[in-house]
Amino acid sequence: MKEQQSAPQDSIQINLIGEQRKATRDYNEYFIPGSIKLVLATWTQEKRNSMALDNSNFFRYRFGFEPPKVARQQVLEIQTKYDLTDREVRWLHRSGQLKASRTEAKLVPSRLMPAAGWIQVSILSFFCLAMTLQIAASNAPAWKQALGQLIISGLWFGGACMLNSLLLAPWRTLKRAGVVKAAKGE
């Protein structure tokens, strides 16, 4: 009985809610995340925004680019104003619809982006369809034709998804957020 009472506890308790607290008389709890994904999943939006404003590395991991503090503040204001997710802000920046300079960050909706996206998807579709028909009309064995058509279909699907993410989806995001209507009225 005495051995059981004097044996140290071998259990580890992890605190996922707070940063630090005095749990009992024997130990303190610290929030030491194993990865940045755990921080992004457990912290509130306000806490993530304050950390992103003060820490450029956290902002870069969260949004994929690293502007100065003034522009970081404006990006966070844009995200809050239009109710955008972190992923949407990241894709808006990649597509050029969100411009971040040394002094400011602003949304720049361009009507050429979705038009260019649809034109590029149409051209890609035309060439992939032509290659698929050329493969089907060849004298190759059936399994080679099927493999060639499968590869062309995979290339088309990958290219169309990339063009959608880069050119078409950011425009839909801006329309959903109401930015396009605001730009039309100005």
Image: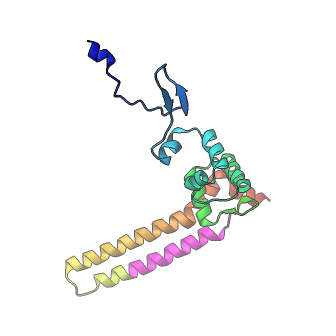
Residue bounds of the magenta highlight: 109-130
Res 44 quadrant in image: top right
Task: State the residue in front, 54 or 46.
Answer: 54
Residue 82 x, y percent position in the rendering: 67, 49
Figure check: 183 above or below 51: below
Q: Is residue 89 left or right of residue 108?
A: left
Residue 93 x, y percent position in the rendering: 62, 62
Overall secondary structure of the magenta section: helix
Give the quarter of the figure containing the C terminus. Answer: bottom right
Figure check: 165 above or below 138: above
* Residue at screen point 31% across, 21% down: 7
* Residue at screen point 48% across, 43% down: 38
* Residue at screen point 59% across, 73% down: 116
Figure check: 143 above or below 56: below
Residue 120 is inside the magenta segment: yes
Q: Is residue 149 left or right of residue 80?
A: left
**How is colour applied across the structure in the image?**
rainbow
Figure check: 95 above or below 86: below
Res 67 quadrant in image: bottom right
Q: Is residue 131 left or right of residue 173?
A: left
Residue 175 x, y percent position in the rendering: 64, 56
